[in-house]
Amino acid sequence: MTTSNIKIARDESAWEIEIKGEVSAESLAKHREVALKELQKTAKLDGFRPGKAPIDRIVAIYGESAVMRQAAQSAIESELPELLAKENVLIVEAPRVQTENPEAGKPLPFTARAPLPPEIKLPDWKTIARKHNEKREPVTVSDEEHAQAKTHLRRERARIDKMQAGEDAQKAAEASKQMDEKDLPELDEPFAQSIGYESVEKFEEALATNMRNEKETQQKQLLRNAILDELSKESTIKYPMILKEYELDEMEGRIREDLSRFGSTFENYLEQTKKTRDEIRKEWGEAADKRAKTRLILSEIAKQENIVPDPERVEAELKHAKDHYKDASESNLRAGIAHALRNEQVLELLESQ
């Protein structure tokens, strides 16, 4: 290895490694010859067959600075992996490299930065999960809640009836809100049958079941959030900021999709809020940090417990997803499904403590 003046430092805030060094003039000259041969293979010059153009003509066509830039790139790409291996440095993405303008006969200073693998130290997650699970109470639907739900449905029927009678939608909504309960449509057999139930009794059974299921879903989500919030607070997690950027990109992508469905754009959203994209992403920073940490926590528990999704389940979900996302990459869909199923298994494990 011909890199010299090596200095290695960790940026704790960004969780990255920074490497500074110099590629020797001799190494740069060697890689200049390699770069010229590569350019010679593909150069198309009048009067010469591919691969046969003289080197001096190659330099004249492409320019010495372009040749040296390619030589510099080749030298650094060749020597950085060896340097990282020698220093026993693990990274999770190709380094970002900055250099000065390379010159023949002179060493080339460079600075390379690369994200480090996350470091995660979890607390006693089983005890934390158990503590929250012990607070869980049986889900019930009170008579009052049941009655309120039926009243809400009767108001909805009144609103729809008014609209069908030709009343403006907004006026119909306001009028139905103001109606006395005794004046609302009765929840009788025709009402129940009009919404797909054979009798009032069957409708009320289904309503109670749906309400209970909805409350159970809400309780489960609140429980999961509480467990993950405490795990996040009690864990020691260091991760590269690039993971936070991935989360911000995903959050932005979802908003763009939602706005598109409503016939709007992200640019319109920025204009309405009178904020820049950078300002919006800064506001999302805390949420993105929480999302990144949650992913890492779930991944670490899955690794500790050897949790992997069932391959048959993955393939079944993939088949369904391909029907809805026909243009999506199959490998990306499979990876996303496997990731989601694994996380769900971890969350179920937490709920079982």
Image (spheres, rainbow, N blue to C red):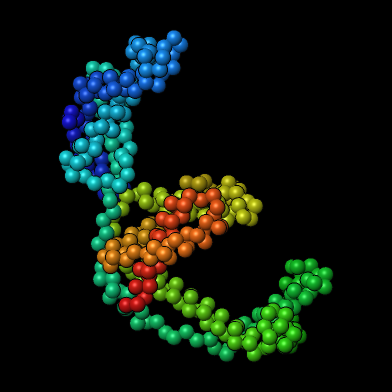
Q: Count numbered badges in the picture.
A: 0
Q: Is residue 335 visible?
A: yes
- Residue 350 at what x, y percent from top left? 34, 73
Quarter where residue 81 is shown: top left
In the displayed orientation, state which residue is furthest to the right. Answer: 166
Rendered residue at 40%/82% (across/down): 136
Closer to us: 190 or 121: 190
Report whether 99 appears left or right of 327: left
Rendered residue at 58%/51% (across/down): 269
Q: Quadrant of the N terminus?
A: top left
Q: Quadrant of the C terminus?
A: bottom left
- Residue 65 at what x, y percent from top left? 35, 19
Report whether 213 appears left or right of 113: right
Quarter where residue 307 is shown: bottom left
Rendered residue at 35%/16% (across/down): 64
- Residue 240 at what x, y percent from top left? 32, 50
- Residue 111 at what x, y percent from top left? 27, 34
Whether 132 is drawn above or below 144: the answer is above
Rendered residue at 29%/26% (across/down): 72
Q: Is residue 178 visible?
A: no
Whether 285 is drawn above or below 97: the answer is below
Whether 314 is drawn above or below 275: the answer is below
